[in-house]
Image: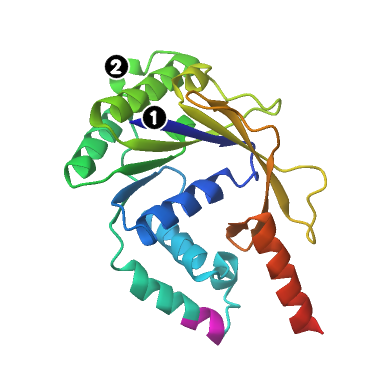
Amino acid sequence: GELIIISGKAGSCKTTLARQILTHVCGVEKVKSALITLEMSEAQIAGQTLTDRSQTSYRKFMAGVANERDWAKLFKAKAEAEGWPLFITARARTPARLSAYVRKVVRRGARLIVLDYLQALQPDPAQARLNIEQQVSFASNTVRDLAVTLGVRFIVVCTESREGELRYSDAIRYDAWRWIQMVQPDENTEDNPVYLCTLKKNRFGVLPKNDKELYRVGDRLLSSAEWLEHTKTNKGRKE
């Protein structure tokens, strides 16, 4: 088992990164996976996953400005995604329900579990009187124990404070095998939609010296090489 934390402040693309990893694992590698979302409905997350896969914009569809080409790409992605080995729920909202759901999907073969996001979990009745730090610590310990006992990989999205610290509990930092931090730097602009991806902790390996630059295009994150190719293609179309 392995527990991977992806953290960041609001707007840092932490959920985008987690969802893109999930899409690759279950959509390309065909590994049974599960997504537990606490911010959006199951329909919303399914829609965003399809727009990510089809390389279209979720916002364009919601605004009613998607063109015929966008719809064609979306329907093609939908046909492909219907065969994905993916479980989605928005109902596992307490540690107890989370544990029960994860055990169920693991019995059905799931090897990757993505939780978005840890601090949104509500306490079980037995933890209702604890303070928020204790509640989040309990939730983090629950996820860690599930990863270890069930032998599955967990990717858990976490929020950060304005100071860049993991919100509400240092237990998250200690429970994680790996901690990835997403940052929106000052140089991020509409023409340069860059985000910095930093490996802050790697329990069984060496930390890289440099941050990895990722570029947001629609609902996807591109590598530096992909971004360069994207800008060349778009420039050629404009000319």
Which segment is the magenta one? 68-72
Q: Which residue is mark 2?
A: 126
Whether residue 51 is situated above or below residue 23 in the rendered picture: below
- Label disc, if present, on residue 215 of the rendered structure: none
Nearer to me, 202 or 129 = 202
Q: Taking 110 as reference, is 233 left or right?
A: right
Q: Position of residue 21 (x, y in %)?
A: 47, 50
Q: Position of residue 134 (x, y in %)?
A: 44, 14
Residue 41 in sight in this render:
no
Hey, what amino acid is under mark 2? Answer: Ala
- Label disc, if present, on residue 122 of the rendered structure: 1
Whether residue 215 is situated above or below residue 218 in the rendered picture: above
Q: Taking 2 as reference, is 236 left or right?
A: right
Hey, what amino acid is under mark 1? Answer: Gln
Q: CA separation, marks 2 and 1? A: 11 Å
* Residue for point 39% across, 53% down: 25
